[in-house]
Amino acid sequence: MSKNAVLDLESYRLANYAVQVPCYICDGGNAFDAELCRHCFAPMAIAHQAAGQDVEPLLVATIGASGAGKTVYLGMLMDMLSRRPERLQLLARGAFSLTLQQLAVEALATCEFPTKTPSEPDRWNWVHCQVRGPKQRRAVELIMPDIAGEALLEEIEHPHSYPVIRSFLLKSSAILLLVDGARLHEGGRDQDYFVMKLLTYLSELGDKNGKKTGRDRPLALLLSKADQSEEAFEDPAGYAKRHASGLWQHCQERFPEHQFFATGVAGTCAFRNSMGEGRVRIPLRVEPRGIVEPFEWIIGRLKT
Ligand SMILES: Nc1nc2c(ncn2[C@@H]2O[C@H](COP(=O)(O)OP(=O)(O)OP(=O)(O)O)[C@@H](O)[C@H]2O)c(=O)[nH]1
Ligand SMILES: [Mg+2]
Ligand SMILES: [Zn+2]
């Protein structure tokens, strides 16, 4: 047997690592084969997908306290739009964009709500999709992550603790803000305080040049779980004024382009005692109401 063999010199592969790919969310440099951004943990697939097309994707933030209903709302919205394209047509880009919808719908189909979103950004579900209205000639590309409420609170209380949230909110073209309508009805002031802190953070966000960018974008305020309080559907703004006066006043003064909506995903809910978790709310019926309207309002106001 001969000891001589021809071996390919593979050091040329290292050249690929010399060129950094910027993350679409935080602009930080990453290796070409990174799955998640090493600075903010956003999926690098978004940067690769965005690089291969003419239209720049816009960022739309869905925010709210932990338990406000963000995961349920986003999952249901994606599901409704992808299956019923009459009002808005939605096409997911990248397989990862379907996970959120799948988790939410599978849970609701078995009379459960999806589990709480973990606070670690590398475990969040991101959606990159193409949306087109019936009268729109060109589709818009959107990027929407399902952010954990606990991480949001941490970033508000200790700015820069979650760079992904800061970068995302700074660049967002529109905001969907969920407020737990059922909690407001019970008289819980925690939602009001949380949302006011969030709006203050948003309106004071400045870019590198100190320019405040937070106030001029469309803000849809969604009173979630409105299936628990019919009154919210009749007059969402009036409901907010009565039950969250601080929030209502804040919006009048600081956000010129805002609108209140009421949404609900569950029809009837019940409670089940679960080992380890205590009393858990379960949906007996799924009866989505007011899901598409806020999103439609946002799409109509995006500056493309
Ligand atoms: N009645 C009713 N309850 C809802 C609805 N949406 C959510 N809930 C309840 O609110 C809980 C929290 O909903 P999520 O969507 O997980 O809340 P989230 O904002 O994603 O919370 P984090 O992941 O912790 O940030 C659910 O487990 C349900 O108990 C709704 O439309 N109607
Ligand atoms: Mg969640
Ligand atoms: Zn990043």
Image: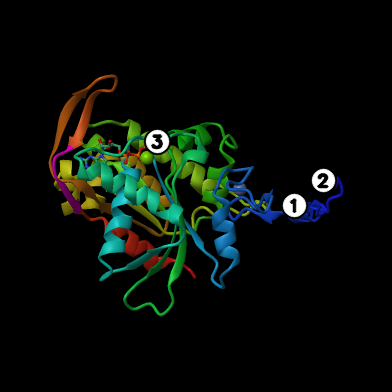
**Does residue 207 show up?**
yes
Classify residue 134 by image quadrant.
bottom left
- In the image, the segment drawn in magenta is 283-288
Looking at marks 2 and 1 on the same chain, the residue that comes earlier in the sequence is marked by: 2
Viewer-closest of 218 and 121:
121
Q: Name the residue tied to disc 1.
A: 17
The answer to whether 16 appears left or right of 88 in the picture is: right
The answer to whether 100 appears left or right of 162 in the picture is: left
Task: Measure the alpha-carbon separation of dots 2 and 1.
Answer: 38 Å
Q: Quadrant of the N terminus?
A: top right
Looking at the picture, how far across and down is residue 53, in whole percent? 56, 70
The answer to whether 176 appears left or right of 230 in the picture is: right
Q: Residues within 10 Å of mark 1 (few under 14, many from 20)?
A: few
Q: How is the image coloured?
A: rainbow
The answer to whether 304 appears left or right of 37 in the picture is: left
Classify residue 92 by image quadrant.
bottom left
Looking at the picture, how far across and down is residue 272, in whole percent? 17, 27
Disc number at residue 1?
Answer: 2
Looking at marks 1 and 3 on the same chain, the residue that comes earlier in the sequence is marked by: 1
Q: Name the residue tied to disc 3.
A: 194
Going by the numbered disc 1, the residue's amino acid type is Tyr
Task: Measure the alpha-carbon separation of dots 2 and 3.
Answer: 75 Å
Ligand 1 near label 3 (Cβ, under 8 Å)? Answer: no
Residue found 46% across the figure and 42% down from its top:
124
